[in-house]
Image (cartoon, coloured by chain):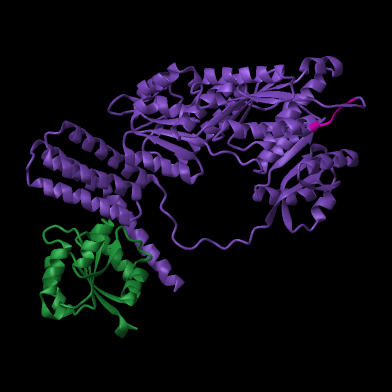
Amino acid sequence: MASTALKKNAKLLALKKAYMDQLPDRLAQIQSQWQTVQHNPGDERYEELYRAVHSLAGSAGTFGFMRLSQLCRETELQLKQWNTQPQDIDLVSRIDHLLQQVKAGIVEVSIAPAEEAGPSSDSPAPLAIAERKICVLEEDAEFAEEISKQLQHFGYEVVVYSDCRQATASAETTLPAAVILDVQYQNDSAADAFAERKKLLQENNIPLVYLSSHNDWQSRLAAVRTGGQAYLTKPVDITALIEHLDQLTGRHQQDPYRILIVEDTELLAHHYAGVLQNAGMETCVLTDPSKLLDKLPEFKPELILMDLYMPECSGVEAAQVIRQLSNYDSLPIVYLSTENALDRQLSAMGRGGDDFLQKPISDNHLLAAVSIRAQRFRALNSLMSRDSLTGLLNHINIKLNLESEIARTARNHRPLSFVMLDIDHFKSINDTYGHPVGDQIIKSLARLLTDRLRKSDVVGRYGGEEFALILPDTEAHMALGVVNQLREDFSDLLHTHQGREFNATFSAGIAASPPHSDVDTLISAADEALYAAKHGGRDQVTLHQSNKS
Amino acid sequence: MSESNVRVLYVEDEDDIRAVAEIALDGEGFELLPCASGQEALEKAVEFTPDVILLDVMMPGMDGPTTLAQLRNMPQLANIPAIFMTAKVQPSEVAQLKSLGALDVIAKPFDPMGLADQLHSILEAS
């Protein structure tokens, strides 16, 4: 039975190949028919043209070229409409444009590799990965002990191997989620034995984190070449190590990249959207660039894919409008167009764009180009927009975030609460215990806030000892309950300094939208409420009077 | 095996699609008579004595529904089940095609590797 299926598949592939070969001729014929017909409305050859397009749509779909089929289908619909309104210039140019895209689609089809016939080869069942297991290869027993204690605090299971033989001989039934490897380890006489094990790890994409006492180029390069995904120098900053592990093991689920697609041909836009969505990205399609000003703060894209030629305004013009807005200075804008003249591509890039992708583009190429840029943008953006001590959003970005959250919740007719929060008597804490202790307290409050609030809430460090919280979909009195609980828990935390134990407290003020519908009045209302809390004796939370009912 | 083959009168104007369907149904318990037009089907149908008629809806000259109506005018074919194939699979259009006496409607583009099973299950369900 399987062999008949194979033979059948081979025959279908041969047929598909033959079909692909004659596509350019078929399109050339369609184009020449269209040239004739568009200048002779009512000509009987219209029927032939229509048939040719219709049949291409059908056959392309049958051979699995869905996008080409959709483009032809769209052309077919436009042709039908043109036949009733042959004077409509827009329709003519629309059809021209579509036929261009069909042409591009055919090129794309012809360069895409044909799928191989036959079932995939059987591979042995992969070893299961234990999500929380971290393997530590470290000879220094004391240091290994310390690391494993710390990692366990953060919910990881740790297995320590003090030499290569031990690691190699261990008959583990599961793979670890990540491996921490001391560079010294590699110099062990049994390093060769470990190579096999390392190969297994690499085949299974298990991330490798190097620890080293060297901070020079050669050592770092060697780590890269041997597959290290992170390189930390001793003494190891445990917080940094945890962050790397959380990220590498996918424990901190990354939000999907948000990609805005500005493209007037809806069909194509949705094709790109589909490709990006399949790779786990979040997309938003805009067929009308004039809606950009509303869409940007709402969707907060991390990359814009911009069509170059659109009827109302060109992609370059749209990009330049975006660049007028300082908030979007660094947002990557990638043009997508059939334009193949290098000088025009370069000129488009000179004006607002970051890159130029030429249509037709293979799905893989599109995916790679988009995800790499979005990833870089996110990393840079986080450096620029986050406070280095706490990793929370900084002042300017709290405001930007607040702006878009207000817009979003208002549109959905949902409330939003904004909280200003300030550590009490912070100056005297600093004076009494020293700045490192003050920093420690700020970090502990930051950790408490992020751990306890919802993922949809925004936590920011507004300045010095001042924090801001954005709580979407939350009424003022609900926010009051939440923040009061946080206040109590924070005041319970015991801080120590040179054997002395002490507590810290905070005060907070809350204001909500509605009634405050713009950023500045909402912030100043929350500020007033905070002021009232301080004056009321500190260690308390106050609602702004506009939210008392 | 050959005695139990289902005889299919297949009407499709598109050469490529016809070729795909022929391969798809080959060796799957069907005997196929491919026709490139409604006219050709009318000429060959009675002699072929089909068990089922499979037709494309949109064809130049004589479309699928017209072809079916004409076939049904022939006494020998009046009660042979028919199945349409079409890219337009809106529920209203499907309902309309079924009201013309079709057993079912297969959406285009069809999956070549699944077409035989699809046909068998439609026929079994009837």
x 32%, y 24%: residue: A314
x 21%, y 62%: residue: B96
| In front of the other: B7 or A412 | A412
Can residue A28 be seen here? The reply is no
Chain A appears what colour? purple
- In the picture, measured across the screen, residue A356 lies left or right of residue A211, that is left
Q: Which residues are magenta?
A: A492-497
x 16%, y 77%: residue: B77
Q: Position of residue A53 (x, y in %)?
A: 21, 48
Q: Name the quadrant containing residue A32.
A: top left
Considering only vertical position in the picture, is A485 above or below A520? below
Considering only vertical position in the picture, is A532 above or below B89? above
| In front of the other: A439 or A372 | A439
- In the picture, measured across the screen, residue A495 lies left or right of residue A133, that is right
Q: Position of residue A187 (x, y in %)?
A: 82, 40
The residue lying furthest to the bottom in this view is B3
Image quadrant where one finds the C terminus of chain A: top right
- In the picture, measured across the screen, residue A270 lies left or right of residue A71, that is right
Q: Position of residue A95 (x, y in %)?
A: 22, 38
The residue lying furthest to the right in this view is A499
Magenta span has B54? no
Chain B appears what colour? green
Q: Name the quadrant containing residue A426.
A: top right
x 10%, y 46%: residue: A45
Q: Position of residue A204 (x, y in %)?
A: 65, 51
- In the picture, measured across the screen, residue B40 lies left or right of residue A133, that is left
Can residue A371 be seen here? The reply is yes
